[in-house]
Image (cartoon, rainbow, N blue to C red):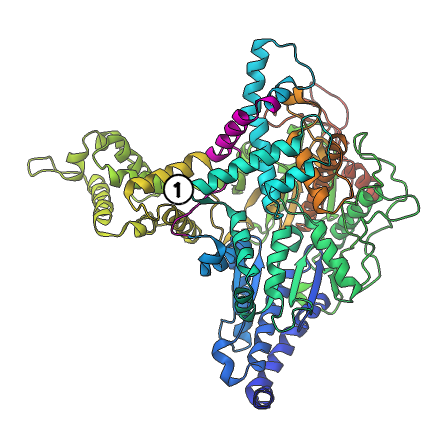
Amino acid sequence: MPQESQSIEVSSSPVSSLREIGIASIRNTLRLGQQHMVDWESGSLAVSAVPGAGKSTGMAAAAAIAIARQYDQSSALRRNSRRQLIVVTFTRSAVANIKVKIREYLKKLSLPQTGFTVHTLHGLALNIANRYPDLSGLQLENVTLITPNQSHRFIRTAVEQWINSHPGRYSRLLEGIQFDGEETERLRRQSVLRTEVLPELATTVIHEAKSSGLFPQDLREFSQQTTDEYQILSIAAGLYEQYQNLMRSRDFIDYDDMILAALRVLENENARRIEQNQVFAVFEDEAQDSSPLQTRLLTILATDSHNPNQPPNMIRVGDPNQAINSTFTPADPIYFRQFCKECDAQGRLVTMDQAGRSTKIIIDAANFTLEWVNSLYVKTGQEGQGGQGRISTSSSSSPSSPSSPPSSPSSPPSPSSPHLPISPSPFRFQRIRPVELNHRQDDVNPQAVGQGLELYTPRDIHHTVELLSERVVELFSQDPDKISAAILVRENRQGRWLAEALSSVCKRHEIPIYDVGERDRHSHVPEEILAVLQFCDRPHSPDYLKRALQVLVQRRLIETQDLNALATLPEEFLYPGPLAAPQPQPVQKAAHLCRSLLRAHLELPLYQLISFIALTLNYEQAELATADKLAERVNQQIAGNTSMGAMLNVLSEIVSSERFEPVETEDLEARYTRPGQLTIITMHKAKGLDWDYVFIPFVHENLIPGRFWVPPQSQFLGDFTLSEVARAQIRAALHAKSTLPSVTAAWEQAKHLKTAEEYRLLYVAMTRAKRLLWMSAASKAPFTWSKPENLQEQTPCPVFPALKRQFPQCVVSLVTIPRADTNKSGT
């Protein structure tokens, strides 16, 4: 066969031999689990990776080697049509990072840095839908992309339309569990329903249902299986239908519509074959955050069109124990767990359980936390693994944790979290192991600082700051330019309070604080671009001129000066006449910059203006990428109505009604983990990062695992929220439950989901530390961090006292500091 002989000839060529040597060289630098990834050649492979196992490195190496093998398997006649590898990951920043790593490995193999594409899921779906507009139903030049949220006008309009169409059901909601008919209370309830309860229900259900491929009619059918007096799923179906009608009538789409559109394309046999023939495999990162639609789309693309009955060619990498998004996104770790179970049955499950990130005591603490929490869910005589069982393909069976999980925990979590024999345990049983000896010197577990684990019980949050700042100063006094440190908080309000409380001592010792929540609260790019464009549109407006000048000052492009004097008479400032007094140098520079912006408005096409302004404002890489994302979004929305007025309307809507997510590029990790600074960051945002020293203060039960809290203003409906009941019922239907849970059962399931996820979040936070993990739970802390001055007795997170019992040598005994309010030790 000609092609076979050519393939043999290529594979035996000197170039191919050198490539095999390069592949072997790369493989030898990897750990055992990573080597299993690079050995993949076809079929489905599940990779369950513990924190710090190097899954991104393993995926990048596997991708480069898979591409190299494609080169060798392609004949010279087919080189131009060689298929590509598709890599899908969760965020734009991860896209940028994985691209860099794959290119580095391809360079080591002396290969062109091509043969692969990296996408977020929505980017991949949009590309497919855009190539087949007739099949997808998306004419991108005629539609507008939105990010639906509770305050979006479409959600609000859908709520009002549903109320007008269903006065009887709305009246039943107003009555709640009891109502005396008092008019003031009626008005209050109307406001709560219109502005909070129903918008929240609509937002939750739309995300949950659309990402699972469900339509309003499906929810109505589900509703027939329930008997709640409010008919929550029926209300949800009506809101969903109103929202969809609004979207279609005004040519709007959201992110879930992109995936649905791509799936419509792939339902066509010819289009499906074309797409599949362009792909030789799909690699998915962060697979624990997959939704049903995502799984379906990637599985179709990974299927060989010539052998559709064979398993899809795909590697799915994730860690169910780091699934921390399922309570506020449609992601659910149950799907990746099921994939792991199916692959395990076929001997296609790899467990990457060696991690070189942390010192052994931190690994022991993380393993103990996992096993202790899971022990709360164990049935009598059984392990509560949610049907998943123990990992059977671990590269070693030797435990690294200090002990087996206790059969009867001495400190149950709380009265609201009893043993839950019918619920899956929060964690998949999977111990972290230190890296084996004799491995690369730069990849071994580091030495501990002090005990490696330090457990504190301060008197209150102010005492916490004293202890934390003392330890920070002590650590930073030792070669600060080579260490990294972070404080991980559960919510941004804690971070803001800590940044302020630590500012004076850190300033005194020249320790810079980087408060991620404050820096990244929202992207400043849309606001700045809008201000400059408004000035370009109406340069003679004093208000718009002043705002534009403020942006230029903030960007340090012009000097700080009296902007009111400049903006009072715009004409004289911008175009001074021959009789005008000479302008000082700072004013001349400001006027020149403003005139260049006005000239660009006249000379450049409208679609290039945002990019030009971004360059003029001297944006850094991440800001430029965000500006490009913004320009793409705006240009899509004004297609067919290209005018400055339309552009300003779209930008105003973005700035006023949604949080425009900035693009995070390759420098993301560098900004958050920069040596010599103390980073304050939320536990959620810390995922994927690590530091030498990690501080986790305020480990209290009211936050971890916390309790589901029904806002007082909506308690007239009952001791539950409509949105979470609907979410639990939809997930029960998706998971093929024989009957849908009642309102009470659904609310209990929702509480379990939150509890499980909060424990996983703590596990993620603990595993960010390399050399020292510092944890504390103050005896007194605020009930809510919106009022940090209101201190009261707080119970620690149930894991915290268990850790103190398990690691008594790590409990720091606190010397009594005389205080007016107490003379007791804070031990």
Q: Is residue 790 above or below residue 467?
A: above
**Percent x, y of residue 553:** 32, 39
Identity of the residue drawn at 21% across and 39% down: 587
SS label for mark 1: helix
The picture quadrant where one finds residue 751 is: top right
Identity of the residue drawn at 60% across and 60% down: 298
Residue lying furthest left: 579
Q: Nearer the viewer, residue 715 or 660?
A: 715
**Percent x, y of residue 360:** 76, 54
**Percent x, y of residue 618:** 34, 50
Q: Nearer the viewer, residue 766 or 438?
A: 766
Residue 14 is a magenta residue: no
Task: Quarter of the image for the N terminus: give it.
Answer: bottom right
Q: Is residue 715 above or below residue 533?
A: above
Q: Is residue 709 above or below residue 126?
A: above
Residue 508 visible somewhere in the drawing:
no
Identity of the residue drawn at 64% across and 65% down: 314
In the picture, measured across the screen, residue 424 lies left or right of residue 284, that is: right
Identity of the residue drawn at 52% across and 43% down: 512
> Neighbour class for label 1 at 10 Å: few (<14), some, many (≥20)?
many
At label 1, which amino acid type do we have?
Answer: Pro
Residue 308 visible somewhere in the drawing:
yes
The residue where tag 1 is placed is 526
**Percent x, y of residue 495:** 58, 36
In the picture, measured across the screen, residue 414 lies left or right of residue 238, that is: right
Residue 165 is a magenta residue: yes
In the picture, measured across the screen, residue 618 lies left or right of residue 700, that is: left
Task: Quarter of the image for the C terminus: give it.
Answer: top right
Q: Nearer the viewer, residue 702 or 607?
A: 607
Residue lying furthest right: 381
Q: Which residues are magenta?
A: 140-169
